[in-house]
Image (spheres, grey):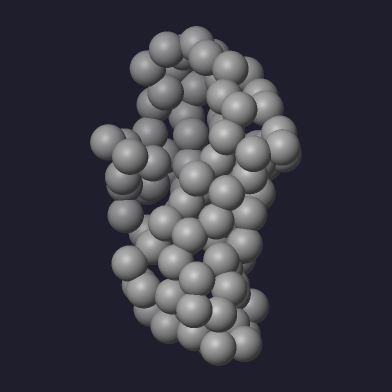
Amino acid sequence: MGPFECGFSTTECDVQAVFPISSTEDRFDVFVETSPGSGNSWTLTFRVAGADTAFTCTISGSATQCQDLTHSGSISAGNAISVKLVSSGVPTST
């Protein structure tokens, strides 16, 4: 979340950031410092105002990034944003 990086928590309100301006977004780029490892993955979904959006991508194996360039969506100024992470297998902690 770039300058809005908020850490990790199972409680969404602990990691939400307030989006500063109204905008239409057309890409979702995610990177991590450590890959999830062979046979493991993380699926990440961009959330706005507590709801999943169409933006989603998966980081798997030795990869450290993913992108969703096929969706777009509007965000209103003041909306809370976050990223949901769902793991598959037993990914490396990062």
Residue 56's spot in the image, x, y percent?
65, 49
Q: Is residue 34 above or below residue 46?
A: below
Residue 16's spot in the image, x, y percent?
41, 39
Query: What residue is shown at x 31% (from left), y 45% (from top)?
Result: 5
Residue 12's spot in the image, x, y percent?
48, 48
Task: Answer with left or right where residue 39 lies relative to residue 32.
Answer: right
Quadrant of the image for the N terminus? top left
Residue 60: name its quadrant.
bottom right
Query: What residue is shown at x 39% (from left), y 26% (from top)?
Result: 18
- In the image, 30 versus 47, the foreground residue is 30
Q: Is residue 54 visible?
A: yes
Q: Is residue 59 above or below residue 50?
A: below
Residue 27's spot in the image, x, y percent?
57, 34
Task: Answer with left or right where residue 3 lies relative to residue 20.
Answer: left
Task: Answer with left or right where residue 82 lies relative to residue 41.
Answer: left
Residue 20: name its quadrant.
top left
Quadrant of the image for the C terminus? bottom left
- In the image, 1 versus 29, the foreground residue is 29
Query: What residue is shown at x 50% (from left), y 71% (from top)?
Result: 63
- In the image, 52 versus 64, the foreground residue is 64
Q: Is residue 91 visible?
A: no
